[in-house]
């Protein structure tokens, strides 16, 4: 098991920034990838970003490239998502998830954190 807890959501005006954190526990994550996903009301879940826990394998969804940055915070033992230049379309529930490096499927999911961007 890889329990995951998201934090850092909230409300912000368009053009603003938020930083989300994903705190995993339960096991060493050297061989895991952490992903961020989001889901807006009435829409399907969308891939946002991912990186291997050890880094150097980052990937981003097209809609967030150049605005969002995924990074490991080694002091806090979290995988963070820095979101800049937020748009109203970024509104949704953001989830972090974990998958084994060689697995195509994310097996472990957090409960989600709400991000609301007002225009």
Image (spheres, rainbow, N blue to C red):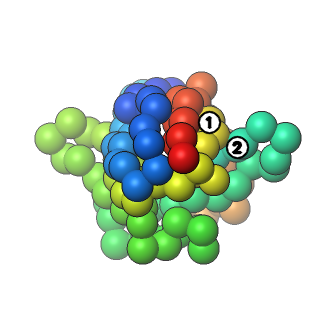
Q: Residues within 10 Å of mark 2 (few under 14, many from 20)?
A: some
Q: Residues within 10 Å of mark 1 (few under 14, many from 20)?
A: some
Q: Quadrant of the N terminus?
A: top right
Circle 2 residue: 39
What is the x, y in percent for residue 109? 61, 35
Residue name at image x 53 percent, y 30 percent: 113
Residue name at image x 60 percent, y 43 percent: 91
Which residue is most to the right?
42
Mark 2 secondary-structure assignment: strand
Residue 23 or residue 29, whichever sits in front: 23
Which residue is most to the front?
119
Is residue 48 in sight in this rendering?
yes
Circle 1 residue: 93
Residue 113's place in the image compared with 33, above or below, is above
N-terminal label among 1 and 2? 2
Which residue is most to the left?
75
């Amino acid at each position: 098991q890889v329990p995951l807890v998201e934090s850092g959501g909230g409300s912000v005006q368009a053009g603003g920034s938020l930083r989300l954190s994903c705190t995993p526990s339960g096991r060493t994550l050297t061989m895991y990838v952490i992903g961020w996903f989001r889901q807006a009301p009435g829409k399907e879940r969308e891939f946002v970003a991912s990186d291997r826990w050890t880094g150097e394998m980052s990937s981003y969804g097209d809609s967030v490239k150049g605005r969002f940055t995924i990074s490991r915070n080694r002091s806090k033992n979290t995988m963070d998502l820095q979101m800049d230049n937020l748009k109203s379309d970024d509104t949704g529930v953001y989830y972090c998830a974990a998958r084994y490096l060689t697995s195509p499927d994310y097996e472990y999911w957090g409960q989600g954190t709400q991000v609301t961007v007002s225009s």
